[in-house]
């Protein structure tokens, strides 16, 4: 994404023209960025050679999943719907892991029937349920157990998952007793220790701590895990301040860890694969002027992009056409939804905007469309993919008829 003269250009396309042609709000993805992210991740962790399972909850568009699958990634799913979609997108079962604290019986049955790589269990009750189903099906099922390493991910509290007190995983004490139980089960095959301490992690130190905890716990179990699933959570640079997770440092801690344990590493990245490949193109409907602050009312809202309302997350907003005119008050970008949390950001520095101008909200490829809803009975936006010199509609805009 760059400005050519005055116009914003994404991989050769002007988002303003896309907005005019396909209407707004409009999600637009860059295949180039997705490829770049995957190559970058693979390169930095080359020596570790992990199985990379894309976290489908970050973006479950079928065409994108197909592309990601063809680039060699597997999938991390958290529901039967995601598992079905991953399979339909051509991702092979032996590259799929199933996470989540509340897998229902029918979801477990489906996962077992499809022979996926691992069901990562998160409680004793779930393990007993998987065992019961495996016995009925006369099968020995491969599972992992998710450890809660009680490690602070130092990220937004709403997206922290690895602290005691979070609902995810089991404590060290319970982990040890569950390992003993599963080892002796006729219908369960213990294959993996899994963790996932949170999302948008920018500092490698929480990962280092997490690895130390895993190291200690594995040593106590004296069990040889075929897989260690380290989860996802790798943070990206949302604010253009060059703060992003240092892959090299994370890679060296894993290499140190692997000197002691001979396991295959699994990653479950979502955000770091797709966040910066997504743009939300939107049009200014009205400008409501105030003394100190103008409300820029755009046609994208919290139903299209929930992260700001849900986590107070910040996304960069940029104009599609530079005009060089400065403002001397605050611009608050808001959507049309009847909620005060339906706002994107307030900025002091921006160019002067006019009604009908277009803007782009950046880094919305992850947890953007996948978190969208029909709140206020608003149809969901269309999705485009820029594939080389081609534009492809990969998600049709919902019509009002769809909602009636
Ligand atoms: C959400 C989630 C991920 C992906 O997290 P990112 O921050 O998008 O990389 C991976 N694993 C599990 C278990 C998750 O819940």
Image (spheres, rainbow, N blue to C red):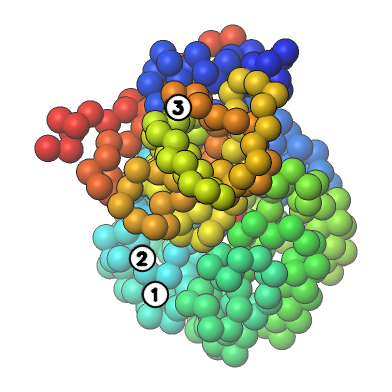
Residue sitting at 53 percent across and 59 percent down? 312
**Callout 1–callout 3 Cβ contact below 8 Å:** no
Residue on which the image places disc 3: 355
| Left or right placement of residue 72 versus residue 185 in this view | right
The answer to whether mark 3 is within 8 Å of ligand 1 is no
Furthest residue toward front = 291
Dot 1 or dot 3: first in sequence order is 1
Residue most extreme to the left: 404
> Quarter holding the C terminus?
top left
Asked whether, in this view, residue 41 is left or right of residue 381, the answer is: right
Residue 353 appears at what percent x and percent y? 55, 29
Q: CA distance from mark 1 to mark 3?
A: 54 Å
* Label 1 element class: helix
Residue 103 marker: 2
Tell me which image quadrant ligand 1 sits in.
bottom right
Q: From the top left corner, tell me how far across and down residue 33 is, in percent.
A: 66, 30
Q: Nearer the viewer, residue 32 or 331?
A: 331
Q: Which residue is mark 1?
A: 126
> Label 2's element?
loop
Upstream in the sequence, badge 2 or badge 3?
Answer: 2
Disc 1 vs disc 2: Cβ atoms closer than 8 Å?
Answer: yes
| Residue 132 seen by the camera | yes
Q: Separation of disc 1 and disc 2 at Cα?
A: 8 Å
């Amino acid at each position: 994404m760059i400005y050519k003269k005055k116009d914003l250009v994404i991989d050769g396309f002007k988002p303003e023209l896309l907005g005019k042609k396909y209407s707004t709000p409009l999600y637009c993805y860059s295949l180039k960025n997705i490829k770049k992210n995957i190559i970058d991740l693979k390169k930095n962790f080359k020596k570790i050679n992990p199985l990379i399972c894309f976290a489908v909850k970050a973006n479950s568009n079928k065409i994108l999943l197909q592309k990601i699958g063809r680039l060699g990634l597997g999938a991390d799913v958290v529901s039967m719907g995601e598992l079905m979609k991953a399979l339909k997108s051509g991702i092979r079962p032996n590259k799929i892991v199933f996470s989540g604290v509340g897998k229902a019986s029918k979801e477990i049955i489906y996962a077992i029937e499809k022979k996926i790589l691992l069901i990562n269990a998160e409680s004793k009750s779930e393990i007993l349920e998987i065992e019961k189903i495996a016995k009925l099906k006369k099968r020995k099922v491969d599972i992992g157990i998710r450890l809660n390493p009680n490690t602070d991910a130092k990220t937004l509290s709403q997206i922290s998952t690895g602290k005691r007190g979070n609902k995810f995983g089991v404590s060290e004490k319970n982990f040890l007793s569950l390992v003993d139980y599963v080892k002796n089960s006729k219908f369960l095959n213990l294959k993996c220790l899994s963790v996932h301490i949170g999302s948008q992690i920018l500092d490698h130190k929480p990962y280092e701590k997490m690895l130390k905890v895993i190291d200690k716990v594995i040593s106590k179990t004296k069990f040889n895990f075929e897989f260690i699933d380290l989860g996802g959570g790798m943070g990206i640079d949302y604010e253009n301040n060059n703060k992003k997770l240092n892959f090299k440092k994370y890679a060296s801690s894993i290499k140190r860890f692997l000197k002691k344990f001979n396991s295959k590493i699994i990653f479950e990245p979502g955000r770091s694969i797709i966040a910066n490949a997504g743009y939300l193109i939107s049009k200014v409907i009205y400008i409501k002027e105030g003394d100190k602050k103008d409300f820029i009312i755009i046609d994208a809202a919290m139903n299209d992009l929930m992260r700001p309302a849900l986590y107070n997350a910040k996304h960069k907003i940029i104009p599609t056409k530079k005009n060089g005119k400065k403002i001397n008050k605050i611009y608050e970008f808001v959507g049309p939804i009847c909620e005060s949390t339906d706002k994107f950001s307030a900025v002091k520095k921006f160019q002067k905007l006019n009604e009908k101008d277009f803007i782009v909200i950046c880094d919305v490829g992850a947890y953007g469309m996948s978190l969208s809803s029909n709140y206020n009975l608003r149809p969901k936006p269309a999705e485009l993919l820029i594939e080389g010199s081609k534009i492809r509609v990969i998600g049709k805009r919902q019509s009002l008829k769809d909602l009636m």
